[in-house]
């Protein structure tokens, strides 16, 4: 079992920045892959960024060059630095962990990000 707790969402103007945090209940060094997904109203949940236990990263095309995923193994926390935010980035952002031999998915409760002037 992995519990995930997100924080850092909020309201920001277009062009602004936010940093999301995801604290895990176990050592993230033992978690195969961690990532961020987002879901806008009426839409499916989509991948934003992934980071493996080895530090390899992968991003959705829509956020490349603007968002950065990172991990701090000493704090068992994964971050999503979001810069140059756009109104279309508005969504609930969910932290995800894929853990164990079956890569079982675990989800946080989500944090709202709203980009609006």
Image (tube, helix red, strand yellow):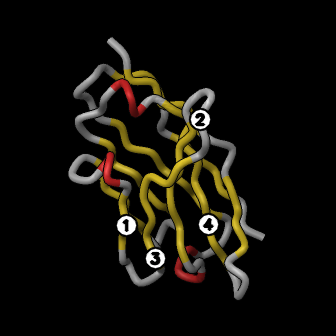
State the separation of the CA atoms marked 1 and 3. Answer: 9 Å
State the separation of the CA atoms marked 2 and 3. Answer: 26 Å
Frontmost of labels 1 and 3 is: 1
| Residue 52, numbered circle | 3
The residue at 42%/68% (across/down) is: 72
Label 2: which residue?
43
Residue 40, placed above or below residue 71: above
Mark earlier in primary sequence (4, 1): 1
The extreme right residue here reads 1
The residue at 45%/24% (across/down) is: 114
Mark earlier in primary sequence (2, 1): 2
Mark earlier in primary sequence (4, 2): 2
Frontmost of labels 4 and 1 is: 1
In x, y percent, where is residue 64? 27, 53
Q: Residues within 10 Å of mark 3 (few under 14, many from 20)?
A: some
State the separation of the CA atoms marked 2 and 1. Answer: 21 Å
Frontmost of labels 2 and 1 is: 2
In x, y percent, where is residue 115? 38, 23
| Residue 58, numbered circle | 1
Q: Is the residue under label 1 in contact with that under label 2 (CB below 8 Å)?
A: no
State the separation of the CA atoms marked 4 and 1. Answer: 14 Å
Query: Element under label 4?
Result: strand
Foreground of the two, 72 or 100:
100
| Residue 97, numbered circle | 4
Mark earlier in primary sequence (2, 3): 2
């Amino acid at each position: 079992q992995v519990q995930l707790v997100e924080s850092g969402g909020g309201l920001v103007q277009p062009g602004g920045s936010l940093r999301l945090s995801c604290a895990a209940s176990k050592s993230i060094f033992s978690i195969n892959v961690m990532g961020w997904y987002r879901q806008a109203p009426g839409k499916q949940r989509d991948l934003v960024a992934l980071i493996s236990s080895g530090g390899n990263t992968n991003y959705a095309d829509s956020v490349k060059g603007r968002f950065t995923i990172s991990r701090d193994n000493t704090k068992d926390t994964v971050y999503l630095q979001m810069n140059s935010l756009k109104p279309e980035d508005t969504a609930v952002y969910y932290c995800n962990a894929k853990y164990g031999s079956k890569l079982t998915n675990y989800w946080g409760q989500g944090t709202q990000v709203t980009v609006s002037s």
